[in-house]
Amino acid sequence: MKAIDWDALHNAAVAAMKTAYAPYSKFPVGVAALVDDGRIVSGCNVENASYGLGLCAECGLVSNLIATGGGRLVAISCVDGQGNHLAPCGRCRQLLFEHGGSNALLMTDDGPQTMAAMLPWAFGPDDLDRNER
Ligand code: THU
């Protein structure tokens, strides 16, 4: 597999962040990911007057992933309003884990980290397969 173009991912995350709808928190977030077929998908947070209904940027990214053909997330860049790396919230780590698995990489201030490191002892699709349903 080709080297990951982290600059391109960062730029896509910043571009997505600029489209965020975050009038309540005033904390725009953008996220972009390289998919295993080479395309880049992205998302931004979309808040709501009913605060608890706000959607994190990663929700948009996953929706974009599935709506444009699916695939596996290989590398992910998430940024705040200043373009700094943002460590996704716990729920969003779970969303990313579902579609990237343990080996997907997430850029942090300490360099790329695996999803296994970002979400240790993760619950995922394999756990469901272990039970008879
Ligand atoms: N947010 C995200 O979009 N992703 C994260 O991983 C962390 C938090 C959003 C939710 C809310 O709109 C704003 O950031 C402040 O929490």
Image (tube, rainbow, N blue to C red):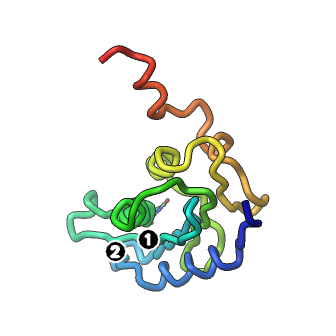
- Quarter holding ligand 1: bottom left
- Earlier-in-chain disc, 1 versus 2: 2
Residue at x 62% of width, y 78% of height = 83
Q: Residue at x 47, y 44 (%)?
A: 98
Q: Quadrant of residue 125?
A: top left
The quarter in which the C terminus is drawn is top left
Number of the label disc, if any, that sits on residue 43: 1
Residue 133 located left or right of residue 115: left
Tell me the residue that label 2 is attached to: 24
Residue 95 located left or right of residue 132: right
Return the mark for residue 52: none
* In this view, 116 is above or below 110: above
- Residue drawn at x 63%, y 60% is 75
Residue 33 in percent (x, y) is at 56, 65
Q: Quadrant of the N terminus?
A: bottom right
| In the image, the residue with mark 2 has its CB under 8 Å from the nearest atom of ligand 1 | yes
Badge 2: residue crowd in 10 Å (few <14, some 14–19, many ≥20):
few
